Amino acid sequence: MARRTGHADLPLHTGTVPRWLADRMRDMGTLIIESLLINSGKREVLRRLADPLWFQSLGAVLGMDWHSSGITTSVLYALKRGINPRAKEFGLCVCGGRGRYSRRTPEELAYLGERTGLDAPSLIRASRLCAKTDNTAVQDGFQLYQHNFILSDDGDWTVVQQGMNPAAKTARRYHWCSQNLKSFVEEPHSGVTGENRGPILNLTDKAACGTRSAVLSLTGESPERLMREIKAIARIAENGTLFPAEDGGAADTGSKSDGTDGYPPEHALPCGCGTRNLSMPARHNITVADIDLKRLGGVLATAYEARPADFESLLLTPGLGARTIQSLCLVSEVIHGTPSRFRDPARFSFAHGGKDGHPFPVPTRIYDESIRILKDAIEKSRLGYTDKSACIRRLHETALQIEENCSPEADFATVLEREKRNSAAWGGRTVADP
């Protein structure tokens, strides 16, 4: 059964993504999805989108702020722009969006049902139940403002939706996946990301079965009797009597019966992931504590120290340098990496920086080279020439081997200094630029 599997703090960010970055995000995001489709199929794409940490890592590698809630809106908008024009080819479609676009999801699903023969009423029901559950059955202080329904022509789907708590300036992202989903009302989530704000009412908790039944039974009681009971409860509360939370549904403080930080012990997501806990700070800058220096060291060693013969087909690409290989190595990890690789999403911002300049401005020339090379590799692989695609995959495999055998560790200060020193030459841009 798909279950809630993690949390992350997501500070609310305002503003818009500039066109120069939005178009690159669309192109790179679509290429990553296309590569996943070629290598692993549609179900794997949906499983990965249902993994909160992979999703955050994808946003970081696309050049968004590594820690903010803005990743949700911008990444899904980029994927919708890139995937939907090729929906028939990909067998995937992204519905919904933010605000008024979220309310159009049923219309979009109905249209797809007419065009493809998919069971639109069931899909619309699933969409509404996902939204209703996270807005009503889980009362955690976050009001939904975004709802995206990603589905395949096989009828599988993933939902990614986000709620806002304006007073706390935080957001919570909820992930759903149709694969292995047995119930909409009992621990249905494949993942939840957001800040733990203390006590919540969670009627989807497995332990809240008794509460759900009691709530349902109340609908058959007479209003007069209910009012008498409510008044009696109010009198007791005024006298200072506390109600014990016996079944987990009446007062869920974020802690399960096993006492593990409010989330279940290690278990598998539909994509094979274990518990997905992530805490995103409000600060913009990335620190040493935010990344796995050994893994970043493996990436840098692959880019700057690997033997030319290891990546001959890539190195023959005009204009390719070590810095582009660094980006492609992290892109390769997003495509080919296992779930355990995404516990430090900040590391993936070392591919193409961040739009606010953290950890460094977006190197647009490197970004464009990465898009061009990945696109060329995919196009050639479709024609049967797989050398470049295999070479991009080998970037990740080489970084893994270096990690295991050489124990590299990146010098964080030196890496940042090099990025900023070369920023102008690499076309570095931020949202603050004219």
Image: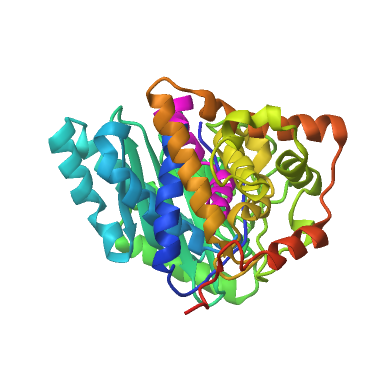
Residue 406 located left or right of residue 96: right
Secondary structure mostly seen in magenta is helix
- Residue at the spot 57% in from the left edge and 51% down from the top edge: 61
The one of 46 and 311 positioned closer to us in this rendering: 311
Q: Is the image coloured rainbow, by chain, by secondary structure, or in one colour?
A: rainbow
Q: Position of residue 6 (x, y in %)?
A: 62, 47
Residue 209 position (above or below residue 78): above
- Using the rendered image of the protein, determine whether residue 179 is visible from the camera's viewpoint: no
Q: How many marks?
A: 0
Q: Is residue 273 above or below residue 194?
A: above
Where does residue 195 sit, x and y in percent of width and height?
Answer: 61, 62
Q: Which residues fall within the magenta stretch? A: 36-63
Q: Is residue 296 above or below residue 102?
A: above
Is residue 44 shown above or below 105? Answer: above
Q: Residue at x 43, y 71 (%)?
A: 16
Residue drawn at (63%, 29%) of the image: 312
- Name the outermost residue toward the top: 384
Q: Is residue 75 visible?
A: yes
Q: Position of residue 263 (x, y in %)?
A: 65, 46
210 is within the stretch colored magenta: no
Of the pair 27 and 193, the residue shown nearer to us = 27
Q: Residue at x 71, y 67 (%)?
A: 421
Say whether residue 49 is magenta.
Answer: yes
- Of all residues, the one furthest to the left in this rendering is 114
Q: Is residue 142 left or right of residue 81?
A: right
Across and down, in percent, residue 333 comes to: 61, 38
Q: Is 341 positioned to the left or the right of 136 in the image?
A: right
